[in-house]
Amino acid sequence: MSDSNLVQEWFRYSQNDLVSARHLFENLYPKQTEIACYLSQQCAEKALKGYMFSLNIEPPRTHNLIELCQICMELDSTFSEILNGCADLNLYGARVRYPNQLAVDDAITKAAINKAQVIYDFCVEKIPESNNG
């Protein structure tokens, strides 16, 4: 797979997580808030890693959005604009997947999906032109 195709795949997977989060929250009853928050975290993680791949940097094997965003900030200081969103979504990487770990409601879930969208869009805008396919 070419580098450009690999980058596109990371962003395709990221977008799929976001679409799935929206669907689970907006179209199912009862709303699937926990998994929607988890998928929002996954969307952000894959977008950050996709950005790193776009610069031919192998991302670390971590789910920690703060760590990933800080690496991106070393490459481009404007990633500081999404650090708080990454910190907020970081909570949903594992804890929300298990009972009695983290309670989420509709407002929290909607905010998580919106933050994931912002992070996704931000990362897409940062991809070098040569990797836009």
Image (cartoon, rainbow, N blue to C red):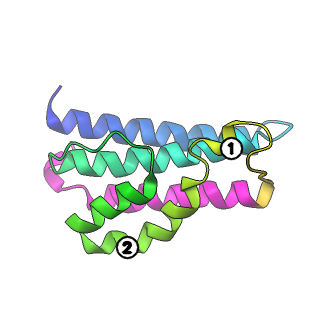
Local crowd at mark 2 within 10 Å, few (<14), some, or many (≥20)?
some
Residue 112 is at least partly visible in this image: yes
Please tell me the numbered disc located at residue 115. Answer: none
Q: Residue at x 73, y 59 (%)?
A: 108
SS of the residue at dot 1? Answer: helix
Q: Quadrant of the C terminus?
A: top left
Q: In which quarter of the image is residue 121?
A: bottom left
Q: Is residue 87 above or below residue 5?
A: below
Q: How far across and down, in percent of the image, does residue 131 sit? A: 18, 46
Magenta segment range? 108-133
Please tell me the numbered disc located at residue 96. Answer: 1
From the viewer's side, name the closer residue of 59 and 128: 59
Gap between marks 1 and 2 measured at Cα: 25 Å
User: On the rendered structure, is 13 left or right of 27?
Assistant: left
- Label 2 sits on residue: 80
User: On the rendered structure, is 115 left or right of 103?
Assistant: left
Amino acid residing under circle 1: Val
Q: Residue at x 55, y 44 (%)?
A: 18
Q: Which residue is drawn at 45% across and 50% down?
A: 64
Amino acid residing under circle 2: Ser
Residue 112 lies within the magenta run: yes
From the viewer's side, name the closer residue of 120 and 41: 41
Q: How far across and down, in percent of the image, does residue 23 sit? A: 67, 39
Q: How far across and down, in percent of the image, does residue 123 sit? A: 35, 57
Residue 127 lies within the magenta run: yes
Q: In terms of secondary structure, what is the magenta stretch mainly? A: helix
> Which numbered disc flags the more N-terminal residue, 1 or 2?
2
